[in-house]
Amino acid sequence: MKRILLNPVILLIVLLIPVFSVFSQGVKPAKVSKAIYHDVIGPIRDLPALTAEELAAEQYETRIERNEELKERLYPFAATALPKGPDAIWQNEMGQNALSNREVFSVFNGQTSYSDPPDDNGTVGYDYYMQTINVKYTIYDKSGNLLAGPTNINTLFEGVPGANRNDGDPIVMFDEQIGRFFVAEFSGIGNAPDYMLIAISQTADPTGIWDRWSFPMTGFPDYMKFGIWRDAYYMGTNTYNGNDIYAFERDVMIAGGDSPQMVQFNNPWRPNSGFHCVLPVDNDGEFAPEGTPGMFATINDDAWGGSQDQLWIYELDVDWTDPGSSTFNRVQQLNVEPFDSNFGSTWDNITQPGTSQKLDAINQILMHRVQYRNFGTSQHIVCQHTVDVDGTNHAGIRWYELTLEGEDWNIRQSGSYAPDDDNRWMGSIAMNANHEIALGYSVSSTSTYPSIRVTGQSASENEAATGIMDVQEISIHEGSASQTSSNRWGDYSNMSIDPSDDLTFWFTTEYNMSGHQKGTKITSFSITTVPLADFHASSTLVPTGQGIGFTDDSYGSPTEWAWSFEGGTPSSSTEQNPENIVYNAEGTYDVQLTATNNNGSNTILKEDYITVSSSILPEVDFIVDKNSLCMNDTAVFTDLTMHIPVSWNWQFDPSTVTFINETSYESQNPEVIFNEPGDYNVTLTATNLNGSSSLTKNEMVQAGGYTPDFLETFEDNGLTEHNWTIENPDGDKTWELFETGGTTPGNTAIGLNFSDYLAIGQRDRLISPPFNLSGLSTASLSFEHAFAKKHEEATDSLIIYISTDCGTSWTRIFEGGDDGSGNFATHEMTDDFWPEVASDWCLSGWGASCIDINVSQYTGNADVRFAFETYSFYGNPMFLDNIMVSPTVGINEDITGKDQLIVYPNPTKGVFTIILPENTTLNELLITDYTSKTVYRQNIPNNQKTITISTDKWAPGVYIIHASGNNNIFAKKVVKY
């Protein structure tokens, strides 16, 4: 559900904004000034690196909340904004052009940071990589060896006006036309005067000598971003009621001049988004043609104002001879496919595993950098920003490639990249000399920890301008921890091009290490390749006389193929995927493939790859799509037999099955309905040219459902292993898996996070697989739960239903919470609940007993299912775990009283411990299975209160513990899984 900030005062102001026709010729500078300080420092390789103690102290010193203006997110026209459905150019499938590992050249650790956000960015030179974060820099060689730092950025500026502070938002770039590094940092957060500090290395070695300048600012230059251009270093800032567009005199600065000029503009064409920075365009490779004005770009969401979603293009024509005559103008408003940048009015946007803490999507601006390329015959711009691709706050990256046609920029291609259910945001994009595009970003969801990945568009895909990132996503770092201390993630990252070859991409961004400490990664990779030839055969162990097929697996988009088959008929082919290559003689044979594209050729020879045998028989295996199913459901069997079977024979015990959809017992992959409840054994006999083999899988299918005992722990394969389903009528928050603490086994529980569910009174159902209770006289449903009330006057609720017709009709059998009856809280009332220890759950501690429901009246039926329905009231999360359907009833599970047995861990995989009640004399311990067969017995010595028992020789199932003595009898279930 969107949270829309609709302020009527702001809305009125927006409606009264004039068209700005008075500015059709552009605006003049608001101020012209010069640097107030210049000197030289270095070599900076001699500056002291921070000590381990100083780095450790950072966690208490650098947690400044930066760029608070980011909180200003205005969507006054959200009600009428487009799109109303999914993004029209949403790429919802992964690209299939895979990169081999040898094309990811390096991945190494960058700096760590305790800042919120860390503002990680970096750039590559001819021989070095320089990284800046809040508030430090490091310098590496291209192999990742640390050459300088980590050092505070204001140490680089020590003695410069403004360097008494170390305020951050650093930017580092490489000016490849002169081979120099450029670093900037602002100064003055909340404390005038404000400065922009700029340093430029004197050579391509950033560990050497640097020139430094200080420029006084008119207003705080928040969230500044820079772009390199032929005639200036251009800067945009988030300065709403002041100067926000700047040009710095590049020629004077690269000559080491004392007083370079600075021109400031107050941009009258700022989008009405609240926080906003119009980004300067950064020139990679050859400069734009002489006389081309500097450029800026941004987005405008129709939810902010305007009739359509657009890209806005600006030009700054600077005249350093007469800087007062310089002009700044918005020159184009390009209509784009409608996009949704509205993730609500707060920083709580991106989900993470195991926590209700969300992360900032940084969604109302173009992301660093907007890159320009001049290829002589064509000029290009690439840029990107974060969007909601389907109206559910599902973050993806909208990207654009623009080309100059005449005097106007036009959108050549665009797309919104979100290939699965994960969120992708805080991206950076760049194009290399081969017209290949790389895109790097952060990734997170309720099942994926914040991670780092890259994708891209190959040259052939770019030539077709498909709007598709066809390069298969590469994981640079898979996260292992969520950020729980803050919703601020990062404000930018950076993708840069290696100037040594103008082909290799370098990307840096952050991940969470633990607590609020973030790490960074630096990676280099390439998508410029001749083909990397590879292939596989449909089988490599072949019966004599059998034909097989070959599949091309080459990387790099080959267009021609040349195959050679030793011992095969035919012995060669030019098809991409040749079929029916027949081997008539026993032996081992080589296969060779040469793959070719416009960049060249590559050959692979697989020696002794094919073995031909007259004695090899089928190696039988098979699977079924669901092991437990209702009586009218269809089971689909899939043959996995190796060694080229040519015929199949399926047998079922009992034989009471019906084959459907034109399949039979001789089909390779039959579809079957089971006609009576119970367990079925399945046998497959497969035959190849040499003979037959068989395999039987006992009790493979449970028709009518699982026969108790049944235990669901939600570990390993979660919901899919036993085919749980979810009904989510409103398409909003619903049941999902979370990482919790306090239960065994594992740390996974199913739950619904009501604290993020703004819709009151919605019902979501978690539906079990079917169960076969036809052979039972008693049965029970039990589970562990964790919940704490958030509101005194009302609470979220849990209702449980049973169905005896596989879910066609339902009967309510339990209510917990205000929509039902009674209280089932396991923790005292709080506004921030998440189970971490055993006492947060029902089996121990503060509150309610675990739920154990006698469902014996429904025995005698197959196709029994249970539905766990929630009723939302914007409270705390609710969790369930260890859901059990048992053939036993009546054993008290409540261990909160002092006179009860305590058993842990429960469920158990091996050893468990029993704690006997205090002030009670017990002399015998007896443990039975659900058929009352004794599996363990011992006398209890006087004063013994703890007994540990191994279950190694017990079958999985439910067991009953009986402790007795002096007319006292205590009983409790324990589950072996």
Image (cartoon, helix red, strand yellow):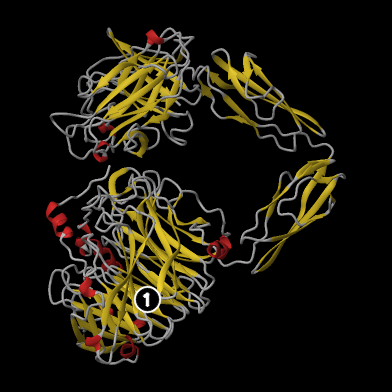
Which residue is outermost to the front? 21
Residue beneath the point at 27% across and 7% down: 967
Q: Quadrant of residue 869?
A: top left
Disc 1, SS: strand
Q: Position of residue 329 (x, y in %)?
A: 28, 75
Q: Position of residue 80 (x, y in %)?
A: 27, 49
Residue beneath the point at 24% across and 66% down: 270
Nearest to the observer: residue 729 or residue 62: 729
Residue beneath the point at 49% across and 49% down: 93
Q: Position of residue 405 (x, y in %)?
A: 45, 72
Q: Is residue 221 above or below residue 593?
A: below
Q: Which residue was labeled with disc 1?
A: 173
Q: Is residue 896 above or below residue 831?
A: above
Can residue 50 be seen in this snapshot?
A: no
Can residue 336 be seen in this snapshot?
A: yes
Q: Is residue 526 above or below residue 896?
A: below
Left or right relative to 422: residue 189 = left
Left or right relative to 648: residue 360 = left
Image quadrant in which the N terminus is located: top left
Total marks in image: 1
Nearest to the observer: residue 258 or residue 18: 18
Please state which amino acid type lies under the numbered disc 1.
Answer: Met
